[in-house]
Amino acid sequence: MNNASVNVTVVGLQWGDEGKGKVVDALSRGCRYVVRFCGGANAGHTVRVGEERYALHLIPSGILHENVVNVIGNGVAFDPAVAWQEIDALRQRGVKVAAGNLRISAAAQVVMPWHGMEDRLSEGRLGDRKIGTTARGIGPCYADKARRTTAVRVGELLDPAALREKVRRIADVKARTFEALYEGPDPIDAEAIAEEFIEHGRRLGPMIANTGALLRRAIASREPILFEGGQGSMLDIDHGTYPFVTSSPVTACGVPAGAGVPPSAVGQVVGLVKAYTSRVGAGPFPTEQDNETGQRLRDRGHEYGTTTGRPRRCGWLDAFAVRYAADLSGAGEIALALLDVLSGFDELKICTGYRLAGRDMEDFDPQIMGEVECVYETVPGWDEEIAGSASFDDLPDAARRYVDTVEALLGRPVGLIGVGPDREATIVHHTGVRGLRA
């Protein structure tokens, strides 16, 4: 047995919000570790257990399972204040969160208060040209990571004297920069910030670790690991619809660097896809339906951001873009989410390709998505509500044909089918993931 049959990586293949939390929660049952390797509190993963709904932003989605060690890797932009809000909320609901089941990389970058300030000031200055960030400070945090001299790592929270001095120095740089670039920025209280983050370090101390070494030991011992992606592939800093993207590598390509493991540890890759498409914020969206169809998808799918509450833009499934993303991450199978949202449509459309200047495009290119015309295949819809269907055979003929069409267009099996928000509302179909069988 090799690592490919032990570990699994879950990544979104669209613009995020594909339902990764639910799938990670389902796959976590067979894993020892669940690892976040990218992004920050701008990612929102939702898990429903009975009547309980858990919205997770930084804490990995395996936290609801006993005997799972949840790891926040070095590639994450870590906001201690948000993390503590989540930890406290989980504990109040009876979920164990302690050093035994949550480990935070000492090498992860810390989101500081001036990062959120910079995010808001920058977006405000851009006006109509703004990127549409969540204003959580994630982009500025990663920018400081690359700048190095103005970055703070989680491990530095454990040395109060050194942290206090570093915060003073960086705060001075940021205050001067903001004063030069923006009109009337809020003052930065370096002393108050230092005390706040020293306290974060005191509380987080038992959970902070060399998580890369921890995971490499787990790999050597053949303990199963699940790598949990944030956002979606079309928001990848290198391979998405730049510049309308997030600030980290969010495909399976980002796992080794973001978790501190070898490429061979990525294992089986499951690509998450909604049965339609949604997007938050600015940027190209060829299959967007800014009409009654889009509003119907939004209402049926409850398409409002877990992190921001913003209404999402909605449209038909873009199989041409999804296949590109699946190829990029080496996805061996697809998890098709929210199929139940499509109930009640007389007919459904799937984008099978793009046409540019009257010519069919052979290769997908995210940089020209705003200029293309979609080529659609129209398939029959179905009237029956399918939420809670227990098996593939329980689905209406048209729903089964829709899944078959997706498999053919993406060139991959659909392993899991989501038919509702509940934890158990998942049909196990053509999966090859260890421990999951229909």
Image: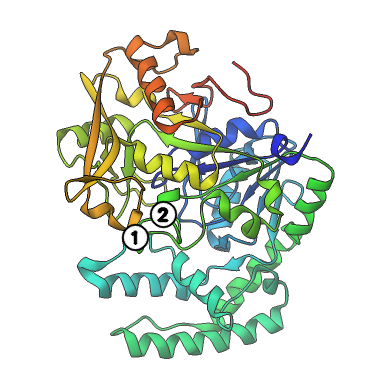
At x 50%, y 90%, the residue is 172
Tell me which label, 2 or 1, sits earlier in the chain: 2
Q: Quadrant of the C terminus?
A: top right
Q: Is residue 110 above or below residue 383?
A: below
The alpha-carbon separation of the residues under discs 2 and 1 comes to 7 Å
Q: Residues within 10 Å of mark 2 (few under 14, many from 20)?
A: many
Is 35 positioned to the left or the right of 402 in the image? right
Q: Position of residue 410 (x, y in %)?
A: 43, 33
Q: Amino acid at mark 1?
A: Phe
At x 67%, y 72%, the residue is 157
Q: Which mark is residue 34?
A: none
Which residue is tagged 1? 244
Residue under the image location 27 percent in, 48 percent down: 285
Which residue bears the numbered disc 2? 235
* Residue at left offset 52%, top offset 39%: 21
Residue 413, horizontal then vertical, whole percent:
51, 26
